[in-house]
């Protein structure tokens, strides 16, 4: 829709962690959670403020490697975000990058 903004979200993990081959990341926008495959996604949203979280679900430990960022979107804006998670044991090093 005209005037909407887009978040270009790239979800990635180290290819050497076999665990991630079998899970689908969870993307949460203002409390609404959806599963999204690893890779690139265009999220079209109306302008406004958003809390965006990404995590790797685990049946044993809940949401692992969860990271959250607050974004303010303007009409027509395209914001590039990247989520990267290294090895499962290094969950504190997961990060969201802007740009």
Image (tube, grey):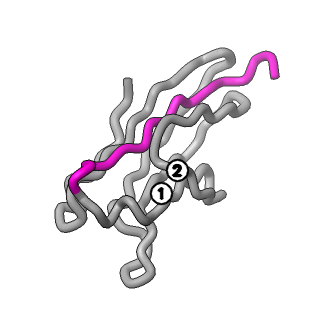
- In the picture provided, is 3 more to the left or to the right than 72? right
Residue topped by disc 1: 25
- Look at the image and tell me in which quarter the C terminus lies: top left
Task: Describe the element under mark 2 as helix, strand or loop.
Answer: loop
Q: Which mark is residue 84?
A: none
Q: Residues within 10 Å of mark 2 (few under 14, many from 20)?
A: some
Marks 1 and 2: in contact by CB < 8 Å?
yes
Task: Describe the element under mark 1 as helix, strand or loop.
Answer: loop
- Residue 8 highlighted magenta (yes or no): yes
Q: Quadrant of residue 87?
A: bottom left
- Residue 25 highlighted magenta (yes or no): no
The span from disc 2 to disc 1 (Cα, nearest Å) is: 6 Å
- Look at the image and tell me in which quarter the N terminus lies: top right
Q: Residues within 10 Å of mark 1 (few under 14, many from 20)?
A: many
Residue at screen point 73% across, 31% down:
46
Which residues make up the magenta segment? Answer: 1-16
Q: Is residue 55 above or below residue 44?
A: below
Q: Is residue 92 above or below residue 50?
A: below
């Amino acid at each position: 829709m005209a005037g909407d903004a887009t978040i270009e979200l790239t979800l990635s993990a180290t290819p050497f962690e076999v665990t991630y081959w079998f899970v689908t990341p969870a993307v949460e926008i203002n409390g609404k959670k959806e599963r999204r495959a690893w890779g690139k996604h265009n999220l079209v949203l109306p302008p406004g403020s958003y809390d965006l979280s990404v995590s790797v679900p685990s049946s044993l430990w809940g949401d692992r490697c969860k990271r959250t960022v607050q974004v303010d979107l303007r009409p027509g804006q395209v914001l590039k975000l990247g989520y990267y998670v290294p090895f499962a044991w290094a969950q504190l090093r997961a990060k969201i990058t802007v740009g």
